[in-house]
Image (cartoon, rainbow, N blue to C red):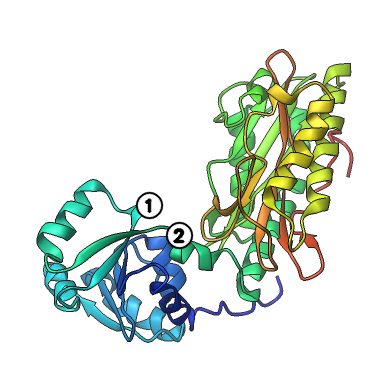
Amino acid sequence: MSELRPVQTAGRLDRLRVLLDGAQVDALLVTHLTNIAYLTGFTGSAALLLVTPDNALFVTDGRYGAQSAAQLSAAGVGARIEVANEQQKELLSASVSDGWRLGLEAEHVTWADHGRYSGEWFPTATLSATVGLVEGLRETKDPGEIDRIREACRIADAAFAAVRPMLADGPTEQEFGLELDTTMRRLGAADVSFETIVASGPNGARPHHRPAQRTVVDGDLVVVDFGALVDQYHSDMTRTVQVGAASETQHRMYEVVRAAQAAGAALVAPGVTAKSIDEACREVIAEAGWADFFTHGTGHGVGLDIHEAPRVGTTSTATLAPGHVVTVEPGVYLADHGGVRIEDTLVVTESGAEALTLSPKTASLTAA
């Protein structure tokens, strides 16, 4: 593994502050831990972050006093850190001026949270729903973030190459998934990005099948969807493997999906709409007569979350820009034949795109 460039956390709070006026709020209470991690570098499980025009108040509990001080300092983040097990409400309330318009992260605040904030925590403020302020900043990855996603993809590629031959030995889906997960960790992943999907034979017709005790047998298409986690950043890749001889329909399914995925991936570039990538994939599948059997979106952003903006789908309004990291993952699912999905993670560059997942796109179990 080459040395990873540092993530450029310092300065993100200032970029967020620029957005407050446009969101018609005076301050923002950040409650979503992934967004807090993005803004501060903090990786613990308990924190609240109040961002005002001139300051930031970071509140955590007694478990994370030393950790938060070290992580925020290392990230170059200027914030007042308070450690409180019982007085979090008082600390935050005292930092919100009377009459302020206080923004809440609408997608991450429950109805119960809103009741507490409006009735007990911030009774003199006007609470306002905000959507996607931090998530919008997260869409464009800096070089350090891209390095971590690339490294996660490299580990996933290497692990899949190591365990793929095991499919010839007739493992269960669970056995193969466990071996793949263990190998990713052995190669340096901190964790897996999500529960690995291993879907063989008829199970492959279920796009998000969970690995079961079914044994892989000759004639199966095996859909394997997996990712590695490196320093909080995810990878995501799907490959489909044919075990034994393929039927005519299975062969055609694979070739159609491979062509659809290639058509979508070829479009990934700055200024291209995410919707047009989805349309390119669907057009190939529709021409084959299987439009009704491509039953999910074409892709999504990847970063601190395995699914984040920008979304690549039929109703997406996103336009790609340099630094966006997205997947392209069309599929066809036929109950009597199984499923095929092929997915790559790509980073948008100034002139086009770079595929970060490099495992061969061939159904043959023995092909390199």
Mark pair 2, 1: CA separation: 8 Å
On the image, which quarter does residue 209 sit in?
top right
Compare residues 54 and 65 and report the one nearer the observer.
Answer: 54
Q: Give the side of residue 273 with respect to residue 308, left or right.
A: right
Q: Is residue 120 above or below residue 218?
A: below
Q: Amino acid at mark 1?
A: Glu
Give neighbour class at mark 2: few <14, some 14-19, many 20+ (Cα, 10 Å).
Answer: few
Q: Give the side of residue 18 with respect to residue 208, left or right.
A: left
The tag earlier along the polypeptide, 2 or 1, is 1
Compare residues 169 and 208 and report the one nearer the observer.
Answer: 208
On the image, which quarter does residue 219 sit in?
top right
Q: Amino acid at mark 2?
A: Gly
Q: Which residue is at 17% across, 73% downward?
A: 99
> Taking the image as drawn, is residue 358 in sight?
no
**Secondary structure found at label 1:** helix
User: Residue 316 in the image: x percent, y percent?
Assistant: 61, 47
Query: From the image, which quarter does the C terminus lie in?
Result: top right
Cβ atoms under marks 2 and 1 closer than 8 Å = yes
The residue under label 1 is 107
Give neighbour class at mark 1: few <14, some 14-19, many 20+ (Cα, 10 Å).
Answer: few
**Secondary structure found at label 2:** loop
The residue under label 2 is 132
Q: Which residue is at 84% across, 31% downward?
A: 256
